[in-house]
Amino acid sequence: MSDLVLATRHNRTGVLTINNPPVNALSPGVPEGIAQGIEAFSADPAIDAIVLIGGGRTFIAGADIREFSKITASGNRGRGPGLNPILDRIESCPKPVVAAIHGTALGGGLETAMACHYRVAVSTAQLGQPEVKLGLIPGAGGTQRLPRLAGVEKALAMCVSGDPISATDALQAGILDEILPGDLLSGALAFAERIAHNPPRPTRGRNEKLPTPAEAAPLFAAARASARTRQRNLIAPLAAIDAIEAAVSLPFDQGLQREAELFQHCLFSDQSKALIHVFFGEREVAKIPDIPKNTPVCEIRRAAVVGAGTMGAGIAMVFANAGIPVLLKESDATALGRGLAAITRNYESSVKKGRLSQAAADERLERIQPTLTYDGFADADIVVEAVFEGMALKRDVFAELNTVCRPSTILASNTSTLDIDEIASVTSRPEMVVGTHFFSPANVMRLLEIVRAERTSKETIATCMALARRLGKIAVLAGNCRGFIGNRMFGPYRREAQFLVEEGATPEAVDSALYDFGMAMGPLATGDLAGLDVGWRIRKEFGDLTDTSVRQPRIEDRLCELGRYGQKTGAGWFLYGPDRKPTHDPETDRIVADTRAALGLAPRSISPEEIVDRTILALVNVGARLLEEGIALRSVDIDIVYVTGYGFPAWRGGPMHYADSLGLPRVLARIREFERLHGALWAPAPLLTRLAAANSTFSA
Ligand code: 3H9
């Protein structure tokens, strides 16, 4: 028998322990090992019941996701019957089989557990069918067995959202038979002894919770309507609904057949390839080639934030939410009061929405200590500066922090664009200075760009990467340049959006083309949300407004001159009422028309396809430059920045994956066309030219 599955005996119970660290994925050898174990114990007269349990930290976290890319790369759509014959073997075992669950039973892991006759778990276990998050549906009977155990409504909720549920929830739903206190294996053995002589109860035959097709029809209609709006553009949620519908309308084996067809369709889709790229990418970005895993890190017990504006207040909440006490400093009492009021409102709203208990909210609020002085900063292990975006002010703050903080305190700047080397130069500890660029709202957005300056030490970076994980963030390491990865690319993206308006597109047409492409929001409405004045101030700081060497976008500067900063002033590109929904503003039309006239541009008709290519390929071209300059370590780092911080659709995998999927020769040809029409701003990045010539990809 394979050493991935260990068979042992405990009195008259056979135990199969899966040993495939770290997450006991169903890699080749694991399902076969389980099947062999079941066979052997079935045939053994000294065994009455069988327990299936995970070794290490978890039950089975699902199929081995790496295997999927091998299947799709082989192009073999006629994949064999997969896991089903093995699950069939478990389900038809004449002796009761008990799944004993700790950690997570996800995807194929839950499917395996559901093929067992009983399921017990520890109270901290989580169960789920997360396949949709990978652009897939459960492919080993999950859509057929789950509705039989938990009913159609619960099965729909789990398979369509992909979110895991707690053991308590699973017990109530009928997925679990018992939650065991104490040691899982001992509890499961006792349970197995108790039920050893019960007749096995195959899940496939438990039809009592299945409604008739007519009864279930409204549930499926509602699920489809909700998926179409809440999971816009995604094919897997709808496929999961179709598969669960088959559980209601077809006998079990035909239902399995239907599930297999839908699974295959999803597996070979571009969406699934992109989502799997994002799954591994989110983990890959934590690995920094020149910073080994064993690099020493400092323990972060206390933090401090300077600046209680939108970003500072949000960052203080991030620390408090992770259990880290934090000082929040402002220079004047009114601003501090405003920051604290915003934090309090935020926690109150979470309590009202049922996302947080009152006690937890109080505890978090207590961890945030407001202050008008630097008293207590000497105890902080890290300070995050989040003051106004201007170099002079940042230099003053860092010079002061350098004197009030211990020499071992990490000094981090939340700047979104400014030079970290220059900021570090005013301190006597440049090795402890780093950029930590949070995204707004800081307590919600998952991305954290960690910016490595010339002299930032490996320990400082390793500490910040580890801290990010503790804060629940996905950290991506960026080099030091104007805008780092995210904003350096966002500049040309938004520049092209504005040029398109100057050339003839309406602001609505630009935003809707990109929304339809899958972006969470159009680029112009995004500017209105972030505040157009932010970019304007930066453009002034960098002298862009007077730079005549390249074409400059003009409309947004004009909007700012008129005090139209976006949502916060009620108008920017669009007009905003109390509901904050963008609506058409004739005043913008006038400003656009005046700007076009001043620039001597006659408006032309522009297709949605051109809008997408001009903006998205601008991202790709700068992305290629960032790779060449070493600002981004790998193309996947750029993808993760865009998917987690800029609303780029995960199902397109990020801008660089998207370019790879189009084919780089095609991308280059389009960029060359734009260069011919629009000049030097579109000069293709040399890396792109080289890769396209070799018909290669960014990820290769
Ligand atoms: C499925 O089951 C389809 C079936 O319906 C059909 C079957 C025919 N495979 O996340 P972590 C790696 S689809 C391969 O850092 P955590 C991961 O890349 C699958 N590798 O740990 C990382 O590697 P590295 C449905 C996997 O404690 C390491 O394990 N299941 C898999 O923060 C540690 O991972 C899912 O979608 C895998 N399935 O979180 C579950 N899972 O160290 C996906 C993990 O080299 N997994 N790895 O970077 C998860 O959600 C989380 O990993 C989990 C642990 C919650 C389990």
Image: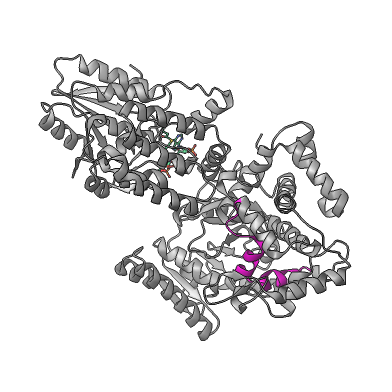
Residue 394 is drawn in which quadrant? bottom right
Image side of residue 265 versus residue 145, left or right:
right
Decide if residue 361 is in sight here. Answer: yes
Residue 162 is drawn in which quadrant? top left
What's the magenta bit mostly, secondary-structure-wise? helix
Q: Report if residue 13 lies within the magenta region.
A: no
The residue drawn where x is 23% and y is 22% is 8
The mark total stands at 0
Q: Report if residue 541 lies within the magenta region.
A: yes
Please tell me which residue lies in front, 63 or 289: 63
Q: Which residues are magenta?
A: 518-543
Instruction: Using the image, determine if residue 454 lies above or below residue 291.
Output: below
The residue drawn where x is 81% and y is 65% is 552
Decide if residue 324 is in sight here. Answer: no
Please tell me which residue lies in front, 588 or 43: 588
Image side of residue 566 versus residue 544, left or right:
left
Task: Identify the coloring.
Answer: one colour
Place of residue 405 in the rendered image (x, y in percent of width and height, measured from the top left): 53, 69
Q: Quadrant of ligand 1?
A: top left
Residue 551 is drawn in which quadrant? bottom right
- Quarter holding the C terminus is top right
The residue drawn where x is 46% and y is 55% is 472
The residue drawn where x is 47% and y is 79% is 371
Place of residue 105 in the rendered image (x, y in percent of width and height, measured from the top left): 33, 38
Please tell me which residue lies in front, 679 or 287: 679
Place of residue 178 in the rendered image (x, y in percent of width and height, measured from the top left): 18, 42
Place of residue 526 in the rendered image (x, y in percent of width and height, measured from the top left): 62, 64
- Quarter holding the N terminus is top left
Instruction: Using the image, determine if residue 337 lies above or below residue 325.
Output: below
Residue most extreme to the front: 214
Please tell me which residue lies in front, 535 or 75: 75
